[in-house]
Image: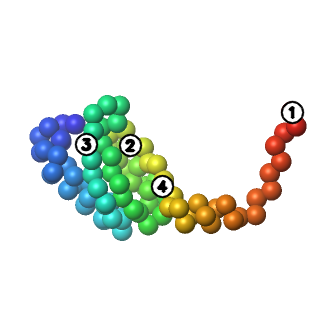
Amino acid sequence: MAGLAKDGGTARAEVIKSLIENTGGQVEAVYYAFGEVDLYVLCEVPDNLTAAALGIAVRAAGGVDARIVPLLTAAEIDAAVRLPISYHPPAP
């Protein structure tokens, strides 16, 4: 928040964009919000390892409480439902 108050929203969004792009990712959008969550970053990173590394680095710096939420495309869900999973729920 100190950086946001000092530099403004556009400058902080550029810092976020640089951070993600330096890992091989791409930022789609940065949104500021009111409420429990103050910032949303829609981005694509190369893999889950990169996403974890970004989250760890940001949280370790103490700047923000970062949460990473992987999003799946409709095609990825289609592929998931075609996987041969055998599950039997417990008997009632």
State whether residue 26 is above or below residue 66: below
- Mark 3 residue element: strand
Q: Are marks 4 and 2 in contact (CB under 8 Å)?
A: no
Q: Camera-side residue: 62 or 10?
A: 10
- Give percent across and percent down for residue 37: 34, 36
Q: Which mark is residue 32?
A: 3
Crowdedness near tag 2: few (<14), some (14–19) or many (≥20) residues, C-alpha within 10 Å = some
Residue at 17% across / 46% down in the picture?
9
Mark pair 2, 1: CA separation: 40 Å
Query: Is 70 left, or right, of 13 in this rendering?
Result: right
The disc placed on residue 92 is 1
Of callouts 1 and 4, the N-terminal one? 4
* Residue that mark 2 sits on: 66
- Between disc 2 and disc 3, whose residue precedes? 3
Around disc 4, counting alpha carbons within 10 Å, would you say few (fewer than 14), some (14 to 19), or many (20 or more)?
Answer: few
Give above or below for 6 relative to 76. above
Q: How far apart in space, not on screen, are marks 2 and 3 (Cα)?
A: 14 Å
Q: Residue furthest right?
A: 91
1 left or right, relative to 65: left
**Quarter of the image where the C terminus is located:** top right
The label shown at residue 71 is 4
